[in-house]
Image (cartoon, rainbow, N blue to C red):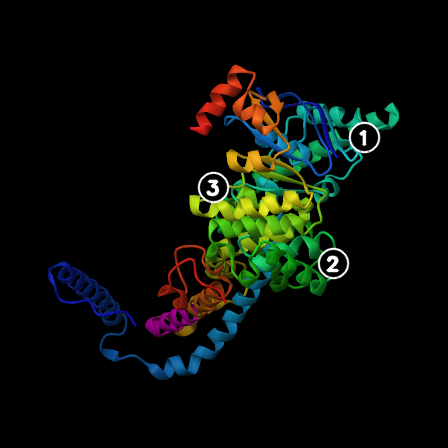
């Protein structure tokens, strides 16, 4: 589904990604953990080409997408993304946020788009909030609208960049529930998160990243309870306590 | 209506401040009135008889200002957008393109051709951006008065056959100078507005599959425009007042009447009263209209100024 081969990324002289390779099967939910600055977010952004890798190849369903002759807009429509800071369009209501990509990128008529957007808002439990503006919603509600917005484009896979890190504790549950349901329905997902409960129950695999490299990967049980590497162990110790 | 302040220790000084300020302002006005009108009395019938021609003259100002403002806004937007673009070193452009092109299965001949085009395009963008920078600096750094004279002399010297009568050359020169001037200032307003929109908004739009232009049109501009309405209003009012400067070219505007009037010596106060009144009327009405527009297009829940209905409600507001 998603394959990444030996990607490198430099920000100026900073070597952010040092030869990352990754293969995600269809329907798999992969969780990425690691200390801040380890390149997790950059890895996600390299997959939907919000950031262009300097070296290496990115494949989507067997097609290499970081080529000069492939439209980046097309690639990003195939892969949905949810951000740490929600990034809902502040000047639009929840419904309009979900609709905008449908009407303006996919060229779907307003009526059809509105129907679809309402269904998606209902799916994330926000049917009653369709006319609210982002500033009138709680963090958890905003993030759920953001998930609906990404789902509206019918993505083949979803990327979550620390979706609950900016939330107050009482709102984390509702967002994780939506994500868990999504994973159960068979959505291919790559999730950067430090929610251990979510990772153990949903993830098929966990990757531990540090200094731009994948240090260790394995089942949640292996990474959390029997890590092989010293760096993994010390990091897991810190977040589990 | 504002709530009345109670007469206590904290507020007493505010009352006295206001009182003092009022005395100074009213006193100053009275002094000017006394100086100019004195014992002869204000000639209301002079104002009544003459305000019409000033009003007609001011339409020339309004017309020039509006045309210059709208054209300048178009130029200013693109210029401002251009100035937000980061410059990328040529080395990086080449490296990025090579990295991408190696993967595509085109012939080496086509690839090197495309590389040359990419580099050339980067060069053009850089050049245009630098010209934009220089333009804004020149417009900001020189007096409008000089710009008007400059535009006029360019038209007169370089296009002598284009205009048949001197008043149309003066009008065109004034219009060109005002447009060029406001374009430079509006470019800065737009640049500030575009740069204030949070980068996450652009990222979210791009992640949905919006092109650069699409993200600009549907996400950045709607937010940036709301932010820059107050400075744009300022610019319009400033331009409106500055448009009186074209009187030096002989365009019939309000100021020309003031400067040329035979009765000038006799009715100084009346003439200034008319002119001031007209200007204030137009700018204040405009400001009120813009204020209404602003609250109409305000994004609910955002910013510190809440709308009336929201003020007594707890946030986040409950939406049915």
- Side (left or right) of B86 relative to B158: left
Foreground: B17 or A43? A43
Q: Assess disc 3: are there few (<14), some (14-19) or many (≥20) residues with their C-alpha within 10 Å of its C-alpha.
A: some
- Side (left or right) of A184 relative to B102: left
Residue at 33% across / 72% down in the picture? B269
**x and y percentages locating residue A108 in the rendered image:** 74, 58
> Which secondary structure, mark 2?
loop
**Label drawn at residue B114:** 1
Magenta-drawn stretch, dominant element (helix, strand or loop): helix
Tell which circle, 3 or 2, labels the residue nearer the N-terminal end.
2
Residue at 21% across / 70% down in the picture? B4
Q: Which residue in the protein does label 3 denote? A: A166
* Membership of B280 in magenta stretch: yes
Residue range of the region highlighted in magenta in the rendering: B266-281
Q: Which residue in the protein does label 2 denote? A: A108
Please state the chain letter of the residue tagged with numbered disc 1 in the rendered image: B
**x and y percentages locating residue A171 in the rendered image:** 46, 48
**Whether labels 2 and 1 share one chain:** no
Report, in whole angstroms, how far the alpha carbon at label 3 lies from the one at label 2.
33 Å
**Of discs 3 and 2, which sits in the foreground?**
3
Residue at 68% across / 33% down in the picture? A47
> Which secondary structure, mark 1?
helix
Please state the chain letter of the residue tagged with numbered disc 3 in the rendered image: A
Q: Quadrant of residue B276?
A: bottom left
* Membership of A29 in magenta stretch: no
Foreground: A140 or B252? A140
Report, in whole angstroms, how far the alpha carbon at label 1 lies from the one at label 3.
43 Å
Count of numbered marks = 3
- Side (left or right) of A58 relative to B222: right
> Which secondary structure, mark 3?
loop
């Amino acid at each position: 589904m998603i394959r990444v081969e030996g990607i490198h990324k430099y920000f100026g002289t900073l070597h952010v990604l040092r030869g990352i390779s990754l293969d995600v099967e269809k329907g798999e939910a992969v969780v990425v953990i690691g200390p801040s600055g380890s390149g997790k977010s950059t890895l996600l952004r390299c997959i939907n080409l919000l950031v262009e890798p300097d070296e290496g190849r990115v494949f989507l369903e067997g097609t290499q997408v970081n080529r000069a002759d492939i439209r980046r807009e097309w690639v990003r429509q195939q892969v949905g993304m949810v951000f740490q800071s929600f990034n809902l369009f502040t000047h639009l209501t929840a419904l309009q946020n979900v609709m905008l990509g449908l009407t303006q990128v996919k060229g779907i008529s307003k009526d059809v788009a509105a129907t679809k957007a309402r269904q998606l808002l209902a799916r994330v439990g926000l049917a009653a909030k369709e006319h609210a503006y982002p500033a009138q919603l709680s963090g958890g509600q905003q993030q759920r609208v953001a998930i609906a917005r990404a789902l509206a484009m019918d993505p083949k896979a979803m990327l979550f960049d620390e979706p609950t890190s900016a939330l107050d504790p009482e709102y984390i549950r509702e967002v994780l529930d939506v994500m868990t349901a999504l994973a159960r329905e068979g959505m291919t997902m790559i999730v950067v998160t430090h929610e251990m409960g979510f990772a153990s129950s949903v993830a098929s695999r966990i990757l531990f990243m540090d200094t731009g490299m994948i240090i260790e990967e394995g089942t949640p049980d292996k990474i959390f309870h029997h890590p092989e590497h010293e760096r993994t162990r010390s990091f897991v110790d810190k977040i589990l306590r | 209506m504002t709530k009345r302040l109670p007469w206590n220790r904290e507020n007493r000084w505010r009352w006295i401040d206001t009182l003092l300020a009022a005395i100074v302002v009213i006193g100053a006005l009275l002094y000017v009135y006394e100086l100019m009108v004195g014992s002869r009395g204000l000639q209301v019938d002079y104002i009544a008889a003459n305000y019409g021609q000033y009003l007609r003259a001011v339409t020339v100002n309004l017309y020039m200002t509006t045309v210059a403002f709208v054209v300048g806004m178009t130029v200013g937007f693109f210029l401002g957008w251009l100035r937000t673009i980061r410059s990328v070193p040529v080395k990086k452009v080449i490296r990025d393109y090579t990295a991408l092109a190696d993967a595509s299965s085109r012939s080496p001949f086509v690839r090197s051709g495309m590389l040359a085009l990419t580099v050339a395009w980067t060069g053009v963008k850089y050049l245009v951006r630098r010209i934009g920078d220089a333009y804004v600096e020149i417009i900001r750094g020189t007096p409008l008065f000089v710009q008007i004279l400059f535009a006029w002399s360019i038209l007169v010297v370089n296009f002598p056959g284009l205009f048949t009568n001197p008043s149309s050359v003066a009008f065109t020169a004034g219009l060109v100078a005002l447009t060029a001037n406001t374009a430079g200032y509006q470019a800065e307003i737009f640049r500030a507005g575009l740069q204030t929109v949070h980068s996450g908004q652009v990222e979210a739009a791009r992640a949905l599959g919006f092109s650069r232009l699409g993200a600009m049109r549907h996400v950045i501009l709607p937010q940036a425009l709301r932010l820059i309405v107050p400075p744009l209003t300022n610019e319009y009012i400033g331009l409106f007042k500055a448009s009186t400067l074209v009187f030096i070219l002989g365009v019939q505007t309000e100021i020309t009447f003031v400067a040329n009037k035979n009765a000038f010596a006799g009715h100084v106060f009346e003439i200034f009263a008319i002119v001031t009144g007209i200007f204030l009327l137009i700018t204040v009405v405009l400001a009120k209209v813009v204020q209404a527009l602003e609250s109409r297009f305000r994004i609910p829940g955002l910013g510190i100024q809440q709308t009336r209905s929201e003020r007594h409600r707890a946030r986040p507001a409950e939406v049915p």
